[in-house]
Image (spheres, helix red, strand yellow):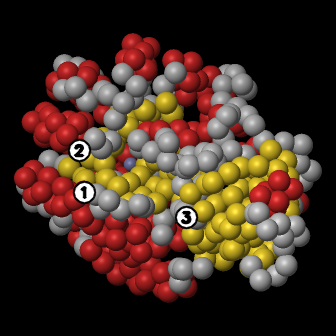
Amino acid sequence: MRQIRRGIPETHPLSSSRPIDALIEARWVIPVEPRGRTLEHAAVAVHEGRILDVLPIAQARARYQPRDRYECAHHAVLPGFVNAHTHAAMTLLRGLADDLPLMTWLQHHIWPAERKWMSPSFVRDGTELAIAEMLRGGTTCFNDMYFFPDVVARAAAEHGIRAVVGMIVVDFPTPWAETDAEYFSKGLAVHDAYRDDPLVSTAFAPHAPYSVSDTTLTKVRQLADQLDVPIHMHVHESAEEVAASSAHAGRRPLSRLADLGLITPSLLAVHATQLEPLEIEQLARHGATVVHCPESNLKLASGHCPVAALVAAGVNLALGTDGAASNNDLDMLSEMRTAAFLAKSVARDPAALGAAQALEMATLGGARALGLGDEIGALTPGRWADVIAIDLSAARTQPVFDPVSQIVYAASSEQVSDVWVAGRHLIAGGRPLRLDVHEICGRAAAWQARVAPDFARS
Ligand SMILES: [Zn+2]
């Protein structure tokens, strides 16, 4: 990618051309909306953080006088990825305990480590490590569920990445909050602090049906309605979760959520590996989103989300990595590929989830789920300029018959060369412009040295 600043003579310095902030010229532009469309030799005009125009390069040069012009000669330019389910700070627990079933992993390893170590500095250092990894891999927005969401919000705003920060609620005390009332008051304070922020917004994040009571869920629904924010929740992650609810409460968790009025367009039901046909129909009828996390589900052997059936029913699908402790990376390119392959395998149908559909899940599907469908997730005029460039000149993505196929089925995150969020250039030629990755990794290593002795003894 070549960057040319104003001052160097433009090819067509027409006096009638309009001054703008930036013009991103690319071999291919994949706007995602409409689905399946790829523009060749096209440009994205950016001004004041938003997309002004998407048009052929020759026309763009005649019409606009950019302050910065980027020539992405071998690249596909597309909307940044929306990682619709993260626990960003858990990057610090990456590789701490692998190869275990969900509940053993949580109860005997992850929760004890969190109880002991979780603090604002743990969350800050883990979130910054996650942001470094996510931006480098083309993720421009993440939907997070973790403790100390005030710290997550601050880190996102500081580093210029878009984030939806979870107002977490869970029925047990943690270092973030002791009681229900405290979870709500602290979460709402974060919501108020970022009410008008261009990059950071909030969602309610009740952890899971098994860890949040009816009374609390009712309050979550009422407040989410009032504030018009999404509800982000683990739902039907494993067969054991559904069986335990059936045994103790006499019904499946989704039926309980339905009675509590939680199945609405605001709901992001994360994982959803256990769904019956009537439940799929119910999610579709009420406009809820399923956030598919294929690699986490595979690693924890939680089961398979019935993607083909959800697509057929018209349920909005988004894609998430989950935390780095159960994935173990935050790589949306590999997540897309796994989602497509797994959907095909589960449905025994190679057409179950095509490349363009997988790309839509990883971008616009997540944006819609978060109530940001008109703001991000596609390259159309008026949306925020959350844009990435992927260099397809590498051997592993040659030759290019179809850039969408190369991106979903062959590209690696190292090929993400440039990232802009709200028009701000954050990664240039693969190098972060605002992050000190060396320093962030140093802090992560220091945490490993602190946490490791606990596990050597156990
Ligand atoms: Zn999760």
The residue lying toward the viewer, choosing from 312 and 323, is 312
The furthest residue to the right: 399
The furthest residue to the top: 278
Residue 375 location in percent, x, y?
A: 49, 48
Q: CA distance from mark 2 to mark 3?
A: 27 Å
Q: Is residue 24 left or right of residue 51?
A: right
Q: Residue at x 60, y 79 (%)?
A: 433
Q: Residue at x 38, y 66 (%)?
A: 89
In contact (CB < 8 Å): disc 1 and disc 3: no
The residue lying toward the viewer, choosing from 193 and 98, is 193
Q: Residue at x 62, y 22 (%)?
A: 347
On the image, which quarter does residue 273 sit in? top left
Residue type highlighted by circle 1? His
Tell me which numbered mark, 2 or 1, is placed earlier along the sequence. Answer: 1
Q: CA distance from mark 2 to mark 1?
A: 9 Å
Give the position of the N terminus as an image quadrant. bottom right
Q: Which mark is residue 456?
A: none
Q: Is residue 35 left or right of residue 163?
A: right
Can residue 322 be seen here? The reply is yes
Mark 1 against mark 3, which lies toward the viewer?
3
Residue 35 location in percent, x, y?
A: 68, 34
Residue type highlighted by circle 3? Glu
The residue lying toward the viewer, choosing from 326 and 431, is 431
Label 1: which residue?
Answer: 191
Label 3: which residue?
Answer: 48
Residue type highlighted by circle 2? Leu
On the image, which quarter does residue 420 sit in? bottom right
Label 2: which residue?
Answer: 227
Mark 2 against mark 3, which lies toward the viewer?
3
Q: Residue at x 54, y 80 (%)?
A: 434
